[in-house]
Image (spheres, coloured by chain):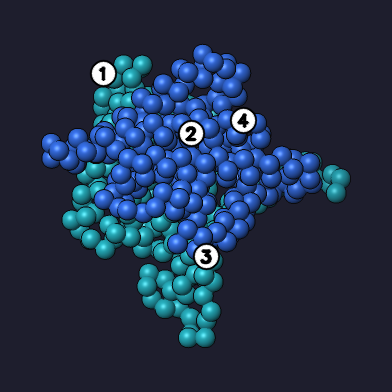
Amino acid sequence: MPTARDRSPTDEFVKGLWKENPVFVQVLGMCPALAVSNTALNALSMGLATLFVLLMSNIVVSSLRRFIPRQVRIASYILIIATFVTIVDYLIQAISLDLHKALGAFISLIVVNCLILGRAEAFASKNTIGRSILDALGMGMGFVFALFCLGAVREVFGAGSFFGLRLFPDGFQAWVIMILPSGGFFTLAAWLLLFSWLKNRKAARAAAAAQPAGGLR
Amino acid sequence: MSNEPLWTVFINACLINNFVLAYFLGLCPFLGVSGKLATAGRMGLAVMFVMLVSSLCALGLNAALIAIGAEYLRLIAFIAVIASTVQLVEMFIKKVSPALFAALGIFLPLITTNCAILGLALFQTNKGYGLAQCTVYALGAGAGFTLALVLMAGLRERLELSDVSDVVKGAALTLFLAGLLSVSFMGFAGLGG
């Protein structure tokens, strides 16, 4: 894996979106990804809340990285993250009470999203503030994108609607299982399958291109 | 204060609303440690112990925070309690069984960021459970977590022997299995009322 020094700022931002997508490639932060992705709107707001917490905690961790002793670093990161999650919790409550009810305890559970602690430990504690902001934005957007993919698929099939708009005529029988917990597992599994198929195909093509022309097969 | 009977609380936490399969809590260890049956069982017990201790601590802390009118500190206080309990369990296992300590590896300190434990503390606060109910709720949730983990480990050990396409191997296959388990756990709905 290349070190952070070799990467240009743009790469720092882009890597989280696709190549190192937190949900589809690293399989991190799945608890909220599955729990609240039953509609596209819930998924999007959860993703944005996580993006905010990730951005703020990366900034603070990165700016304090010289002052936090190694032995107590995890505890300090958790406290920093918990502070911002409390802020988000009260913010969402102030903006929309309905949304706060729909997301429930899962807003508080952003604290234990492995993605945020993982970025604080693996990236923000070793890099400058500027790079940490880019990293947080990239990873956060990747997370929003992944949640949106899950939520959109589950809402379209499970309720026959998209952001509350009906898509199908009245005769459509909704696949209730997609809204239920098991639907979350199946949808994520299907997306992972797609990603691993794409990866395998790319590897196979690279191998084919590396062989001299007119080779076997 | 809620007055749910104790057995309903247990059945609810363990089977109907299984933390892993219905609430998606604690998925990281569920996918990470479920490779071997023996490790999975012990991991489940460690999580159950942490759940019990942190649930009781959270109950006391919540009462104290309400008494001084500082509910906004709840999340931070809970997470601090959980982190110290995990530290305790880690030292205990390292002393008693170094082999198990090595087998659990990174997933032991990661119990701190196991959503199931913080989730438990938050849910019991929301439901307004008393001392006895909290104890039973924590035991039920721990038992449910262990059950899901052991079932998954058993399935995965059998899958090792079967011929699976390369594309499906890994996380995707495990998630499909989890989905099927989740469907079968839906059969418990209506058991506790």
Residue type for callout 4: Thr
Q: Is residue B105 left or right of residue B66?
A: right
Residue A116 percent across, percent down from the top left: 38, 38
Q: CA distance from mark 3 to mark 4?
A: 32 Å
- Of labels 1 and 3, earlier in sequence is 1
> Closer to the camera, A96 or A124?
A96
Chain at tag 2: B
Look at discs 3 and 4 and give the one toward the viewer: 4
In this view, the residue farthest toward the top is B95
Name the colour assigned to chain A in the rendering: cyan
Q: Is residue B1 above or below residue B72?
A: below
> Which is more toward the observer, A161 or B161?
B161
Disc 1 versus disc 3: nearer the observer? 3
The residue that label 3 is drawn on is: A178
Hey, which residue is sitting farthest right in the picture? A216
Work out whether mark 4 precedes mark 2 in sequence or the reverse, and give the earlier one: 4
Q: Residue at x 46, y 26 (%)?
A: B109
Assess disc 2: are there few (<14), some (14-19) or many (≥20) residues with their C-alpha within 10 Å of its C-alpha: many
Q: Are marks 1 and 3 in contact (CB under 8 Å)?
A: no
Marks 4 and 1 sit apart, C-alpha to C-alpha, by 38 Å
- Asked whether residue B64 is in view, the answer is yes
In the rendered structure, the colour chosen for chain B is: blue
Q: Which residue is mark 2?
A: B47
Tell me the distance, in whole angstroms, between the alpha carbons under discs 1 and 3. Answer: 47 Å
Callout 3 crowding tier (Cα within 10 Å): few <14, some 14–19, many ≥20: many
Q: Which residue is mark 1?
A: A67
Mark 1 falls on what kind of element? loop
Q: Are discs 1 and 2 less than 8 Å apart at CB?
A: no
Q: Residue at x 22, y 44 (%)?
A: A87
Q: Amino acid at mark 1?
A: Phe
The residue to which callout 4 is attached is B39
- The reply to whether residue A4 is visible in this rendering is no
